[in-house]
Image: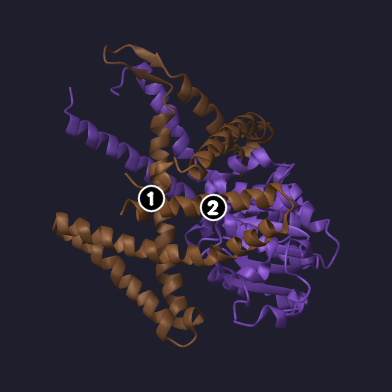
Amino acid sequence: MATAKERLAKTTRFYQIIWALCLIGMFIPLIYPLGLPVVLSEPVKDYYKQIADLPEGSVIAVSFGASASLLDEQEAQFLATWKTIFDYGHKVIWYCTTEDSPIVIRNELEVVKPESYGYTYGEDYVILPYSPLGEAGETAFALNIRSIYTTDIDGTSLDAIPLMQDINDQSGIDLLIFEYTACTSIEWVVRQWVVPYNKPVIATTLGCCGPMAAPYYPTQVQGFLSGSGAGTELEVVSGNPGPGAAMGDAKNLGILPFLVAVLWMNVKPFIGKEE
Amino acid sequence: MAIFKREIPTAVLSFVGVVVLLAFFTTLDIFETLNGVFTSWIPVVSAASVGLGLIYMIYAQYMNYQRNKNLNNLIYLVVPLVFFVIFFGTALVVPGNISSDAYQWLYFHIYQNVGGVIYAVMFFTLASSAIRTMRLVTKDPSGALQFRLEAAALMFGGLIYTLRQIPLFQVYLPGIVGFGEWIMLVPNVGGGRAAVIAAALGAIVVGIRTLWGKERTTTEVD
């Protein structure tokens, strides 16, 4: 009979082997891409449709609560969304709800470059700075934007920005894109935008938060992207290739050791192996 | 001192709560106006709470070190402070503030990578705990095998939904996409909505207790 210390060492070694195999599995497709096709899911198709079906020049507000730490999971979603919005010629108001989001959005617009789509800052898009909004802040934004933001991210008064001239509450916004990373935050937007104003809402979030957005789809939230897989799907459906394809490829083989480990743990008791 | 710790915060909470409720359920302008004023205070209160959080964190780390003066606790106290000073100082002193090259370098070369690594490390802990949780059969102390129904439900839903996300299985396991979607949009939605309704009912009870000044946890921490 092995001692507790020996059993712990054995278990640790088992997980170390699994983790190492997962890492190797993730790296192989980055060197030799598998290029497997992506199957589209309904929430992603509806997400895309909400943007595509808006009349050209509609105003989209993006409640942008991105986290730099989670960009690997979400960057494909973001880039494909911005490209889709620009493709259809909609106007965008980004308002930043996390400390990271002003830096993230500025960095991403260096990649996507709205100007290459004929956009002009202030007329076609604007970025509002960080404000720690939370749920009550979402209410305040929907009621009176200038009660939260008096200037844009560069310190220019909202009254001096052409796009913001006639917009001061939810009535000037045609679609809300809600980006969040705390799973239950989806309820904020349902309570503060959908219930009082019946505003169309779509959402972007992490893979683990998808199941918590699903109860509100498609009635309150008309479409959502959860995780890098959904970002890849949006790249495909919108025809805007990006980093999502590589992420999807890395998951293909990285998951296999995990599945083998689950199988082994379930077979073990039947072949007389020690727990 | 209880009046400052308990009665005044409770009175403020109750007053604001009642006004916001009346603004929602009535059409009187006075409540709508007050609601607008309260909501415009939110960024100020939130920003103040971020500052308070920073002070509380430093105080907690300092007290932790005072209780147990070892090298680890000293590192836990000093390292966050050093990086706080570097980031805060760079944002304040370098022209361009958070848009300056120096701050952007700190942000994208230190903060983002450290954050990404912490998130990535979670993969390992999540994977190992999932492997242990998804054991359908375990041995009890007498050595007899026991079937675990909860583990079976978790394994069934979790694996189907996970496999649905992977292109390899989407291609070579026909039906997994539809099945994964069904798991997420039917059983998950049923359970999720039930949980939301239960939480909403609980929130109503807590809300009423708070307005009534009976919810001790809103103003006190055990």
Which mark is on residue B101? none
Do marks 2 and 1 share a subunit?
A: yes
Q: Position of residue B151 (x, y in %)?
A: 46, 25
State whether residue B42 is above or below residue A16: below
Circle 2: element type = helix
Which tint is chain B? Answer: brown
Q: Quarter of the image holding residue A135?
A: bottom right
Residue topped by disc 1: B6
Amino acid type of disc 1?
Arg
Q: Position of residue B28 (x, y in %)?
A: 72, 54
Q: Residue at x 42, y 60 (%)?
A: B115
Q: Chain of mark 1?
A: B
Q: Looking at the image, which residue sits at the far right?
A: A55
Circle 1: element type = helix
State whether residue A167 is above or below residue B177: below
Q: Residue at x 72, y 49 (%)?
A: B26
Amino acid type of disc 2?
Phe
Which mark is on residue B15? 2
Q: Position of residue B171 (x, y in %)?
A: 66, 39
Which tint is chain A? Answer: purple
Front residue (pair B34, A126): B34
Q: Chain of mark 2?
A: B
State whether residue B192 is above or below residue B18: above
Structural crowding at the residue carrying mark 2, measured as other residues with C-alpha within 10 Å and reported as few (<14), some (14–19) or many (≥20): few
Q: Is residue B99 left or right of residue A166?
A: left
Q: Position of residue A2 (x, y in %)?
A: 18, 26
